[in-house]
Image: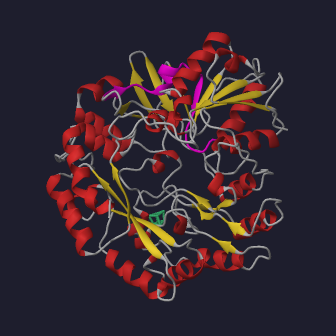
Amino acid sequence: MIAKTGEDFDIIILTGEYYDDHPLSPVGVIARVLDEKGYSVGIIEKPETDAQFTRLGAPRLCFCVTAGSMDSMLHNYTPMKRKRVDDPYNKVSSIPNRAVIVYCNKLKQYFKSVPIVIGGIEASLRRFAHYDYWDNNVRRSILFDSRATILVYGNGEKQMLEIADKLQKDQILKGIKGTCIISKETDNSFEILPSFKEIKEDVKMFCKMQKDFSIYKNLAQEYDNNYLLQYKYPEYTSSDLDWIYSLPFTRKLHPNSQLKMAKFSVVTHRGCIGNCNFCSLSLHQGDRIISRSQENILKEIRLLTKHPDFKGYIDDLGGPSANMYGMDCTMSPSCKNDCLSCKNLNRSHEKLISLLKKSRKIPGVKKIFVRSGIRYDLTLDSNEYIQELVEHHISGCLKIAPEHFSKRVIALMNKDNNRFDEFISAFNRYNKKKKQYLKFYFMVGHPGDNIVETSYLKEVITRKNLSNVEQFQLFTPTPMTVSTCMYWTGLDPVTLRKVETICDYKTKKKLKRILLDISNK
Ligand code: SF4
């Protein structure tokens, strides 16, 4: 069983988050998977003092280090680079800046010879050379700065089992799909990305690197006398997900857990076919959908109804975009086309509708909420889905993210709002007898945005009378996204055309101020 004290663990995980034995917690999932395969796992949460780092002694196989489900810099700073302040649910200050590097350096101090595996969002999306907004400069791969043995990217269950197995057999950690290592050499199974030196000196080479990124290829990047090698992502199947989410999670949450509102959430699938340019999900867990089987999800819901704390409400039934469940395609991952504009994509939502209908009928279930975001433009090919959602699965309001109304900005985000009004009409049609409403999310400061475009956004919001604007998010250039590449290079990486970018805080503030009176209404 997973223990939190004592010595002689096979693997010890150090995490920047509180530990929850829950399928929505990345550490919780890795711990369960390892435990299921017979490895003993110790967990150290948010270590600060030397005594906390050394509390469990040295593990038999390796340490695993993660900042948690968010990059520590994003966690600690606002988009204007101001330090975030603590709130009752989140002791912000207890995670150091660049947590992965700090944790690894501390472990190196006490346990020099123990292998260290790094993973989670911070490691995954800093695996190659990347632009760092907080340094306002290009940094090398985090694998060099952390001096860890190996880096796991994406969801790491298969990778961690293979790493543990190899360490158990005293084998070297090489050739493991879904990982990166540092090597003195490369071979012709790797596609060569522009080197660290090249991308630092030439923005066009930075764009080339961005265009060449893929989780489906072996990639190599040169750093002086070394190569950073990425082994392509392992294939995760529907049955893999069924197995992972059927593990005996107790759903016991830490008193300060961020999952309190999601205790009885159920994951339906992984991946997103949206490919929004400001999002890094496709370079983390892939741009193809892998759905769990319907029977497996229903079985999990039936089990939840027996949980002593369950009051009849499923907090969320979803994935990265809730309505992409069942949109798996047999052509993936070899296909290089864009799913959203492909005629092979089954947009009927039939699998999701069937799942929702059957889930509702499970004895003990009073209501199933869909709180994960939905890709609203996709829903327009299935009126039945909109009806299902509006009539049965909304908790008073449905949040959608049009992001912007400027054609120029939306195109640079790789999104499309052409059918926005159509969606509003469909929502209102099914919402007639209910008092539910829509909430909107917008983003300002994205490449292509400026005072004129933001003023236009304000004008359209006012004209369309969108009274429930939840948030105007200021674009933050996070590592590895296409939008971040535009922000740093001032170029569209695909066309190499110039893109206007706003980098000074004065103008960023002005953009927010333009919209302030709308959000204050
Ligand atoms: S065939 Fe179409 S739906 Fe299938 S993976 Fe390719 S682009 Fe996506």
Q: Is residue 236 above or below residue 491?
A: below
Q: Is residue 25 above or below residue 85?
A: below
Q: Nearer the viewer, residue 334 or 455?
A: 455
Indicate left or right for 373 with 80 as reference: right
Number of marks in the rendered image: 0
Rendered image quadrant of residue 257:
top right
Residue at the far left in the pictured view: 452
Quadrant where the C terminus sits is bottom left
Indicate left or right for 126 with 318 as reference: left
Name the residue rendered at 26%, 65% in the picture: 405
Q: Nearer the viewer, residue 79 or 352?
A: 79
x and y percent of residue 48 in the render?
61, 22
From where the camera sits, is residue 170 visible?
yes
Q: Is residue 65 above or below residue 153?
A: above
Residues shaded magenta:
137-156
Rendered image quadrant of residue 358:
bottom right
Quadrant where the N terminus sits is top right
Name the residue rendered at 62%, 35% in the picture: 176
x and y percent of residue 192 in the render?
39, 33
Q: Nearer the viewer, residue 304 or 90?
A: 90
From where the camera sits, is residue 407 visible?
no
The colour style of the image is secondary structure
Name the residue rendered at 33%, 74% in the picture: 420
Q: Is residue 499 magenta?
A: no
Rendered image quadrant of residue 380:
bottom left
x and y percent of residue 69 in the render?
56, 42
Q: Is residue 147 magenta?
A: yes
x and y percent of residue 510 in the render?
20, 48
